[in-house]
Image (spheres, rainbow, N blue to C red):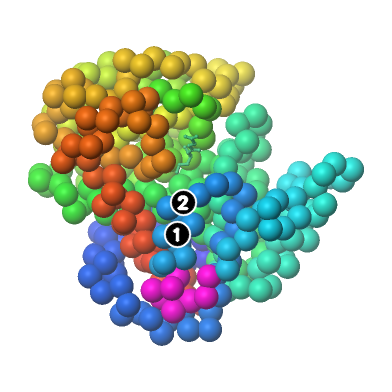
């Protein structure tokens, strides 16, 4: 595996899940695979789970992780090509990438969407520069449009807790005070479209996801109708993807608090489990009563981030 970005990069999902459960059962079984190998984890943005679970996964495989926080530990990096570098950005990615990749065997990148230039974000301009100018396998640790390590961990969690062969999984938009990227919902949709689940997306009008990720997923604008009979409720905020109106890209179109997942929402489901990638804004995205209930899987879901990261790194190490 040379890159982990799209769901197609992982190949057959059942094989990936089987491998995930092997890794989960015996995380130290491949401790010598990563011996004398280095993974560089580069963060342009904040992180808690991704930062810690990636390091833990690397350590389980015997690798040496090095974490770099851009702009704090390093120079501020220029990411646009062809500009006169007279701003506060001291170094260009064009040099930084080959330098960083010369020091490691695998590289992981966190770089959120800027949410101002749709073309720049949806072209995955920064991640693609790491693929083009670096010579090492690249993992997206949430890039402009995808968060595949999260979606894989979500799939593992659904597989572990499902009570039906083909559960109904509903991804619902929920309100948030800030404009957030679409990477998490994009990847979740892309992965659920490939998984053996009945997948429904619900959001206010204008929040339609890019068809590249939404595919043929069912969209139901009536949130309560969408949630009827659900086995899993996956809540997430995202800003406007700019599909119906490109001028609205990255904007907040609604802060409608009636979309907050609370007991009334959960009551129409089939005793559904609640999922969220975290960090979560309590009583904006989800009520305290739901996230603190036994139906909430947010902690086991976060624990599975080590498992998904470890499967990806293991496959990359095996292909080196
Ligand atoms: C990020 C997002 O893509 O939605 C990361 C999620 C894994 N979330 C945030 O930036 C939340 C920030 C906040 O202030 O709530």
Q: Label for residue 52?
A: 1
At 87% from the left and 45% from the top, the residue drawn is: 85
Mark 2 surroundings: few (<14), some (14-19) or many (≥20) residues within 10 A: few
Secondary element at tag 1? helix
Give the extent of the magenta segment.
58-65
Residue 178 in sight here: yes
Mark 1 surroundings: few (<14), some (14-19) or many (≥20) residues within 10 A: few
**Where is 33 relative to 159, above or below?**
below
**Picture coordinates of residue 59, whole percent (x, y):** 43, 73
At 33% from the left and 51% from the top, the residue drawn is: 302
Beta carbon of the mark 2 residue lies under 8 A of ligand 1: no
Residue 221 in sight here: no
Q: Are marks 2 and 1 in contact (CB under 8 Å)?
A: yes
**Picture coordinates of residue 82, whole percent (x, y):** 84, 45
Reading the image, the residue beneath label 2 is 48
Secondary element at tag 2? loop
Is 1 inside the magenta-drawn segment?
no
């Amino acid at each position: 595996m040379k890159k982990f970005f799209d769901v197609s990069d992982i190949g057959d999902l059942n094989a990936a899940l089987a491998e995930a459960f092997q890794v989960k059962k015996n995380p130290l079984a491949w401790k010598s695979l990563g011996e004398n190998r280095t993974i560089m984890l580069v963060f342009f943005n904040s992180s808690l789970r991704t930062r810690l679970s990636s390091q833990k996964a690397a350590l389980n495989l015997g690798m040496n992780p090095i974490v770099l926080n851009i702009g704090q530990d390093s120079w501020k990096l220029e990411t646009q090509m062809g500009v006169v570098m007279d701003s506060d950005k001291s170094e260009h990615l064009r040099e930084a990438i080959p330098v960083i990749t010369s020091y490691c065997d695998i590289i992981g990148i966190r770089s959120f969407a800027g949410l101002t230039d749709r073309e720049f974000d949806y072209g995955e301009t920064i991640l693609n520069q790491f693929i083009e100018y670096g010579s090492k396998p690249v993992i997206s640790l949430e890039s402009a449009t995808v968060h595949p390590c999260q979606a894989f961990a979500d799939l593992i969690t659904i597989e572990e807790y499902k009570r039906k062969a083909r559960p109904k999984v509903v991804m619902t938009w929920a309100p948030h005070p800030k404009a957030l990227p679409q990477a998490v919902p994009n990847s979740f949709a892309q992965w659920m479209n490939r998984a053996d689940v009945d997948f429904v997306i619900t959001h206010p009008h204008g929040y339609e996801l890019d068809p590249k990720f939404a595919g043929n997923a069912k969209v139901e604008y009536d949130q309560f109708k969408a949630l009827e009979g659900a086995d899993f409720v996956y809540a997430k905020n995202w800003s406007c993807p700019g599909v119906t109106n490109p001028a609205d890209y990255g904007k907040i179109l609604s802060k409608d608090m009636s979309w907050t997942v609370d007991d009334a929402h959960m009551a129409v489901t089939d005793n559904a489990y609640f999922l969220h990638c975290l960090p979560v804004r309590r009583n904006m995205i989800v009520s305290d009563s739901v996230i603190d209930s036994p139906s909430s899987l947010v902690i086991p879901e976060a624990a599975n981030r080590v498992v998904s990261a470890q499967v990806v790194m293991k496959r990359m190490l095996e292909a080196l």
